Amino acid sequence: MYSLFDSFFAPPTIVVVSEERLQAAEREAKMKRLKAVDDKLTELREYRQSLAKELAPVEDKNQEVTSDV
């Protein structure tokens, strides 16, 4: 018979992992983080370029106004 308290008093599960598998898992996790950083950098570069394009006409107009004075 199953009771509510069985889940609290269940024996702990022990998982044994080889050193090679642990290193492989750590490497895979680092590769995923590296890809995430690269993706974020690409996103930020694109955003910076779009802002620069928006500001370029404003800067051109400011230079024309200051050169006319």
Image (cartoon, rainbow, N blue to C red):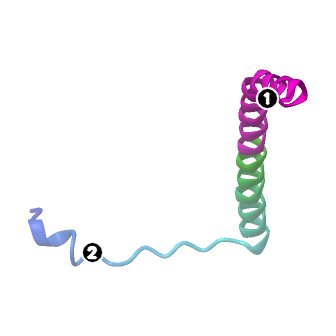
Question: What residue is pinned by disc 1?
Answer: 62
**Which disc number belongs to residue 25?**
none
Residues rendered magenta in the picture: 40-69
Type of amino acid under label 2: Ala
Type of amino acid under label 1: Asn
Q: Residue at coordinates 81% horizontally, 25% vertically from top-left?
A: 65
- Badge 2 or badge 1: first in the primary sequence: 2
Q: Is residue 3 left or right of residue 7?
A: left
Q: Secondary structure at mark 1?
A: helix
Image location of residue 5, percent across then percent down: 12, 72
Secondary structure mostly taken by the magenta-highlighted segment of the chain: helix
* Outermost residue, right side: 67
Question: What residue is pinned by disc 2?
Answer: 10
Q: Quadrant of the N terminus?
A: bottom left
**Residue closer to the observer: 33 or 52:** 52
Q: CA distance from mark 2 to mark 1?
A: 73 Å
**Figure quadrant of residue 67:** top right
**Residue closer to the observer: 38 or 62:** 62
Q: Secondary structure at mark 2?
A: loop
Relative vertical location of residue 65 with respect to residue 5 in this rendering, above or below: above
Relative vertical location of residue 30 with respect to residue 39 in this rendering, above or below: below
The answer to if 17 sits in the magenta stretch is no
Q: Residue at coordinates 85% horizontally, 29% vertically from top-left?
A: 69
